[in-house]
Image (tube, grey):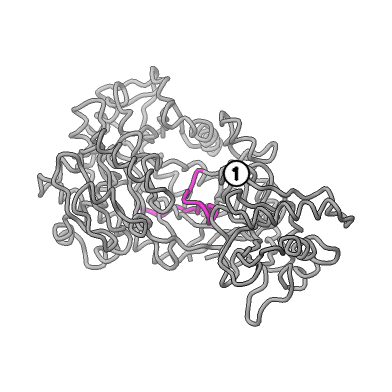
Amino acid sequence: MLVTNVEGTAFKPPKLFFALQDQPHAAAVVNALKDWHDQITWEPSRGDVEFRVFKSEAEIAAVFENGCTPAEAVVIFDGQTSKRFTYAATGRDGTTIPPWARGTQWGVVVGRAIGEHTRNCAQQVMADMLGPNGFEVRINDGHFPWGNRRKGERPPQHIKLPEPTREILERLQMGPNLLEGAHGDFVNMLPHGSRISWIRVPGEAATYPQDAMERRLRAIAAFERASCAVLAEHPEVHPLLMAGVHLPDPWLETCYLKPQSANGPVTSWSVRRPDMHVCGARLVASENDEMPGGFTDLYHVDQAYGLHRNEWNACLSWLHQDGALVFVVSSDWSAPYITSTRWLVEELRRRGFDTRMVTTDRLEDIKITNGGVKLDGERVGTIWRQFPVFETQGLLADLVRAAQEGKVRMVPEFAHFGNKSWFALFHQFEDAFRRHLTDEDFATLMELLPESHLVVHGQDCFPFTVAGFSIENLQSLRDLPKEARDLLVLKITGANNLSARSLGVLVGAAQSEDTWRVWLSERQARQQPFIVQRRFDTSVETLAVLNTRTNAAEAFRCRVLLRPWVVGGKLVSSHNCATPHWTTKVHGMVDMAVQPVVYV
């Protein structure tokens, strides 16, 4: 996806050697390393290295969130090797750094044969990693710290960031202060004075084939239109779709299921941002967000990288074509977006656009009349809905009604298109969907939408088969073996405060059997609907980034979430959320990169 310029090194001598307490052979090696290090007189390593035996994985995570980088660490772990010990490296063929090591670059696998040779192991590791004329000389010669690479083996990755990288960082820091109002622990993970909320900055955009993306986006739009048709033709879909949809005002159900505008029935989003996970050459969608966030970030990142100016001009003109654009931002659910949206409004006003913002705790200046919607006495053309379905009451509900009656345009529309249940209903009502889709769109959706099954309290949802495993009832779902759980994701669905922001998501591969069982029991007790979804392995990509915490170039091994934005039927821009390869999280981290995308 990204072509990296390779020159220079991203690696420095290790500052941390660590193990887990419950791995006795590895813990003994770390303790021996500390003892041996205290006796040597090598410079500059003496006093600049830590040796830690951690009690838990959480302690390891905390260390990497507070200054240490995985590129400057060595994990010692008990493993399967016929030797007393052997070396490992992230990305090296035939070796695996354990996930709990949080992306640590270097490893030492300690075998059971270590016996009485713990001290010898420690001395050899010390010489290879911290010895004079050792680590950096071998790395710069294109070898591993412990010696020459095997025939045909790739050396440790060297990178040189493009020249404009630091200029890009400076421009990013001139935008909205994304840390304003953030929790102190969150702020402390970032370099002092940072205004962006991620620590890794790519030096250039990723590239992706435009035709391939356009094909997927056309299929998603067709999926939304087909959903409307299937809902109208099959009354049995209605209770399944409405399960978990929390509407403060019951009359909003008609608006949700049958959205209208001044131009008649609305059958698809006019502002759309699906989430797509990169799985090698395949993209797999996880949601079609009903109230996407990050529009301001997208605009600012593109400005910093100098991208998509024509597309943004067309997008902003479309948003303002009916008059003033007003962002209505939830002071509760969307509070994290208030600062950045205010910045965007000021930026657009400087560019000559009639743009405003109000928060949902200050709506007294909005008036709805027979002639339309007004803010401070001036007519509003378009409302950007940055408030969720489940908060829509009072004047917010009145604004939805006004949009239904054609008094104002509302984007994204107040509609059912983003309900995760549609992913399951697509498979359950496959024949009905096929009648409303072209062969190309149907084939694209079969590739894009993961196999999903809906479980609703009081509905006959069993049996079903997912990922090759037969699920007869809820109890059999609870009792699934680990090899089955590892292939599944459970997601609360509907429109509520757990179905949004991935808060109600359980990734089977990352959880214990007890956690899996408790989660399902809680859904049953609370009568909460959820979907059982096939999990696809996302591919591990390598990005060349500037780590702002260490101020060094880095080969960042990550998993990528691709987020394309469509406004007014046109692809405007996209960005990648790149998170460390060892985590199941796909966004919302400090320890991540945000990368723009150029379509070719």
Vertical placement of 167 versus 214: above or below? above
Q: In the picture shown, does residue 151 fall above or below 41?
A: below
Q: Residue type at mark 1?
A: Lys
User: Label 1 neighbourhood size at 10 Å, few (<14), some (14-19), many (20+)?
Assistant: few
Q: Quadrant of residue 87?
A: bottom right
Judging by the rendered image, the residue that carries numbered circle 1 is: 55
Q: Is residue 581 magenta?
A: yes
Query: Hey, which residue is sitting farthest top in the picture?
Result: 364
Image x and y of residue 546, in percent: 67, 54
**SS at mark 1?**
loop
Residue 350 visible to an observer of this rendering: yes
**Residue pictured at 56% horizontal, 48% vertical:** 301
Q: Nearer the viewer, residue 367 or 195?
A: 195
Image point (42%, 57%), residue name: 277
State the extent of the magenta-drawn residues as a range: 569-588
The percent position of residue 256, horizontal first and vertical second, equals 23, 37
Compared with 554, 263 (above or below) is above
- Image point (72%, 73%), residue name: 143
Magenta segment includes 133 = no
Across and down, in percent, residue 443 comes to: 26, 66
In this image, 426 relative to 108: left or right?
A: left
Residue at (18, 34) in percent of width and height? 254
Decide if residue 567 is in sight here. no
- Tag count in the figure? 1
Up the image or down, 88 lies above or below 261; here it is below
Q: Residue furthest front?
A: 116
Residue 431 position, x and y percent, is 14, 60
Give the image quarter of residue 260.
top left
Q: Dividing the picture into quarters, in which one does residue 376 lie?
A: top left
